[in-house]
Amino acid sequence: MFGIWGHESAAELTYYGLHALQHRGQDGAGIAATNGSELNLHKGLALLNDVFKRAEFSKLPGHAAIGHVRYPSGGEGSVDDVQPLLFRSQAESIAICHDGNIMNANVLRGELEAQGSIFQTNADPEILAHLMRRNGQEVTEESIIAGLRKIVGAYAFLILTEDKLYAALGSRGIRPLSIGKLGDSYVVSSETCAFDIIGAKHEREVMPGELVTISAEGITSTRFAVREQRALCAMEYVYLSRPDSDLNQVNVHASRKRMGIELAKEAPVEADVVTGVPDSSISAAIGYAEASGLPYEIGIIKNRYIGRTFIQPTQELREQGVKMKLSPVRGIIEGKRVVMIDDSIVRGTTSRRIVRMLKEAGAKEVHVRIASPMITDPCYYGVDMSTKEELIAANHSLEEIKDIIEADSVAFLSADGLEQAIVQDKSINQGICNACMTGNYPVLFNDVTEKVSH
Ligand code: SF4
């Protein structure tokens, strides 16, 4: 998500911001903008570049905008579900987008429908839109807070009205959200890398349980939930975020490098060379090589023009994608005992293909080292790992995983090692969610399975 307030080229800057966030979702993209009296929206089911051509920006005039790139963790893949969602009424219009997952969505939808709400989409933000506008009330800080207090889950929301931009983060801060400044304009983004691309300066994080309001009067902050220990998604550091982003004052590349260093301490192996699966495992591979004293080499090359395998929606596409995407560097691999660093193993199919590829390129041995713990439990907070059945580590022992992915050995970073690599300063409320690796869920809902059957 990206939002901006107070700039004459708000929609264009949102486009550039979203461009830096394209790795977070490639299923769809949208931008809503306000000129103070009217909200307009353009969105589509494609990559950002394909949804927005130059002409589109003339339809999005105004000084404020919010935008979203869609990651298919919910909804049914229709253009209606692409965010931002725009709701028009006689009193006012609102655009809304979110990152995360509302765990009590079905209960809230049922209650709202019983009271007369008619839903137009399957996207979670529509629930907050209905909660805010209940009984015909206007969107204000009070109505937003009343709506947020009904929601159980992990979320970051951006809400745009004709004259205000709101940013809200759930009480445990599971999803990332930061505020920056570009001259006199305010910007809000899921990741700080979007600030750099437009020349904005990162100011601070949106705090867990905080609602930020930005308008012609400036910026104000309201707390809608008690201050709790932050539980920022560990997978943001492991895999999802860009290495040049800072999340809760921890640089992603530096944290990945520390994961590699911890992994080398915990799981050393006799080998000739260390290589990482591009792009998200390179930082950890550098850390592993540095700590183990083994040379780091580029043993695998990525074709830059293919999307990320994990984010593509079907298994068939994922498998096809990895063949097109990665190539071994034979001159580096041939005859060597290779330590192959990967950031995580979710289903295991990608790892097997890469191990096979390295062996076909002449690797004598392939030792797989994973820079995060085994993923044993589903994520209920908006990352697409929704059932235990699909998780290789939920259903197989370490020895079985080694055989399935056809490696000579395999080892995972411990949960303690991961936490040490990420959390550097607990006094500033740094803390992680690692529920998919430990089963310790920071936000619970008594009927969680209901919402994650997709
Ligand atoms: S369960 Fe895993 S993927 Fe989901 S928010 Fe927590 S750390 Fe992230």
Image (tube, rainbow, N blue to C red):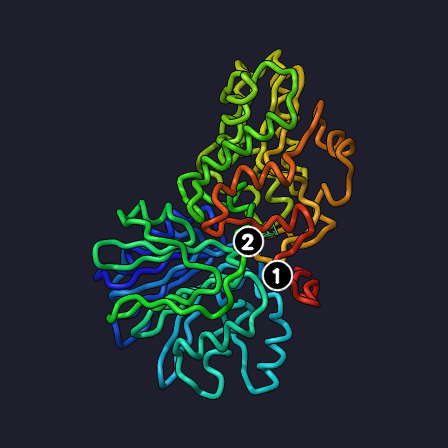
Q: Residue at (40%, 54%) from the top-left corner?
A: 205
Viewer-proximal residue among 372 and 440: 440
Decide if residue 441 is on the left or right side of residue 176.
right
Instruction: Name the residue carrying label 1.
Output: 443
Evaluate whether residue 60 shows in this view: no
Q: Is there a contact, CB below 8 Å, between mark 1 and mark 2? A: yes
First in sequence: mark 1 vs mark 2: 2
Where disc 1 sits, the SS reads loop
Residue type highlighted by circle 1: Val
| Identity, as a three-letter code, of the amino acid under mark 2 | Ala
Instruction: Kindly give the residue lying farthest to the front in the view shown.
Output: 427
Residue 94, position in %: x, y? 39, 74
Question: Percent position (x, y) of residue 111?
Answer: 61, 81
Assign the N terminus to one quadrant of the image. bottom left
Placement of 380 over or under 373, stated as above or below = below
Picture layout, residue 391 above or below residue 288: below
